[in-house]
Image (spheres, helix red, strand yellow):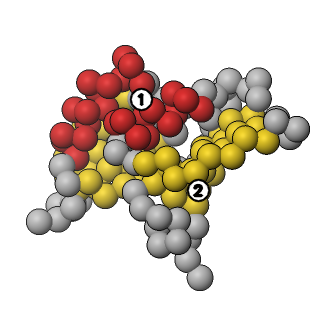
């Protein structure tokens, strides 16, 4: 068994694709439009779906906002430099959306450097700095 993907419902598919590709460096792997069912899917990630877990961005026609609820936590992405990635999110926020919610620094009680950002729909993303 292996993890395949995580699905996120998004209010503006093009904005979300731009955030994940232009800001976080993912690639669009495939896209499917289902007009009869009134939704479009875009799969984004860092590698081929046969070997990497990816994100499925789902846009339901006419739905531009979702209540995130209290059960959802975050997705985690390993990065080379958490502070630099936070800087990229800040620099791109006016164009692509997104925000830094916790600057890069050691996790409480540990030494692993983490940060938290939000995507344009306010889904939380933990950035975990790769250990050198």
Q: Residues within 10 Å of mark 2 (few under 14, many from 20)?
A: few
- State the residue in front, 95 or 86: 95
Question: Where residue 64 sits: x, y (%)?
Answer: 68, 24
Would you say 69 lies left or right of 104 here?
Answer: right
Tell me the SS state at disc 2.
Answer: strand
User: Residue lying farthest left?
Assistant: 132
Q: How far apart are marks 1 and 2 (CA)?
A: 19 Å
Residue for point 68% across, 31% down: 66
Q: Which residue is drawn at 36% across and 23% down?
A: 93
Q: In this view, does 1 lie above or below 62?
A: below
What residue sits 22% from the left and 46% below the top?
82
Closer to the camera, 128 or 64?
A: 64
Q: In which quarter of the image is the N terminus?
A: bottom right
Note whether residue 107 is visible: no
* Residue at the image position 43 percent from the left and 40 percent from the top: 20
Res. 98 mark = 1
**Residue 18 at what x, y percent from top left?**
45, 32
Identify the mark at residue 110; answer none if there is no mark. Answer: none
Question: Which residue in the structure is indicated by mark 2?
Answer: 6
Compared across the picture, whether 97 is left or right of 106 comes to right
Position of residue 49 measured from the top left corner of the image (x, y, whole percent): 52, 65
């Amino acid at each position: 068994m292996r993890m395949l993907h995580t699905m996120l419902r998004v209010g503006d598919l093009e904005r979300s694709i731009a955030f994940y590709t232009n800001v976080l460096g993912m690639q669009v792997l495939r896209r499917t439009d289902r007009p009869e069912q009134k939704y479009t899917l875009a799969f984004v990630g860092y590698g081929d779906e046969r070997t990497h877990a990816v994100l499925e961005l789902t846009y339901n026609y006419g739905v531009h906002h979702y209540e995130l609820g209290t059960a959802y936590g975050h997705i985690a992405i390993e990065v080379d430099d958490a502070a630099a990635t936070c800087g990229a999110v800040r620099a791109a926020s006016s164009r692509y959306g997104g925000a830094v919610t916790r600057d890069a620094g050691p996790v409480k009680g540990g030494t692993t450097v983490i940060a938290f950002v939000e995507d344009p729909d306010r889904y939380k993303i933990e950035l975990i700095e790769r250990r050198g």
